Amino acid sequence: MAKNTEPSAEQAKFHVGDEVGFKLDKEDFTGFIDKGYTNSFLITFESADPEIIDKYHNKVVINNKALTLIKAAPQPEVEETEDDAEDEKK
């Protein structure tokens, strides 16, 4: 069976490098997206709580529906190719 590689509408809002907010153990945290998965993201974050550091090692996978965007990372500009220009004319 083929794997669905298209990002969902919820996931399309986020990109690698974005700063996001989320809840973890009933506390609010902010972190940065390191990697995207089908329905979730790997987030790197920092905490002053030794229990949180011991439990999560400053990385956690969070469902994309539980994330809020704080600051979008700069995205590289995509140059339009000749094929794209021809497709738009049709």
Image (tube, grey):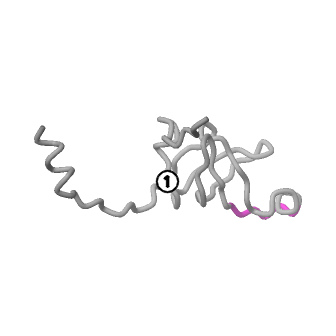
Q: Amino acid at mark 1?
A: His
What segment carries the magenta color? 45-50
Q: On the rendered structure, is 43 left or right of 56? A: left
Q: Is residue 48 magenta?
A: yes
> x%, y% of residue 54?
88, 62
Q: Residue furthest left?
A: 89
Which residue is at 21% across, 50% downward? 84
Q: What is the total number of numbered labels drawn onto the structure image?
A: 1
Q: Residue at x 14, y 47 (%)?
A: 86
In the image, what residue occupies the spot 65% across and 56% down?
A: 43
Instruction: State the predominant SS element of the stretch in magenta.
Output: loop
Q: Quadrant of the C terminus?
A: top left
Is residue 77 placed above or below 24 in the rendered structure? below
* Badge 1: residue crowd in 10 Å (few <14, some 14–19, many ≥20): some
Residue 25 is a magenta residue: no
To which residue does mark 1 refer?
15
Residue 77 sits above or below residue 70 on the image? below
Question: Residue 56, position in %: x, y?
Answer: 81, 57
Res 82 quadrant in image: bottom left
Q: Residue 44 in the image: x percent, y percent?
A: 67, 61
Q: Observer-nearest residue: 47 or 83?
A: 83
Spot the residue most to the front: 1
- In the rendering, at what x and y percent does residue 39 appear? 61, 40
Drawn side of residue 58 relative to residue 5, left or right: right
Q: Secondary structure at mark 1?
A: loop
Answer left or right for 37 relative to 87: right
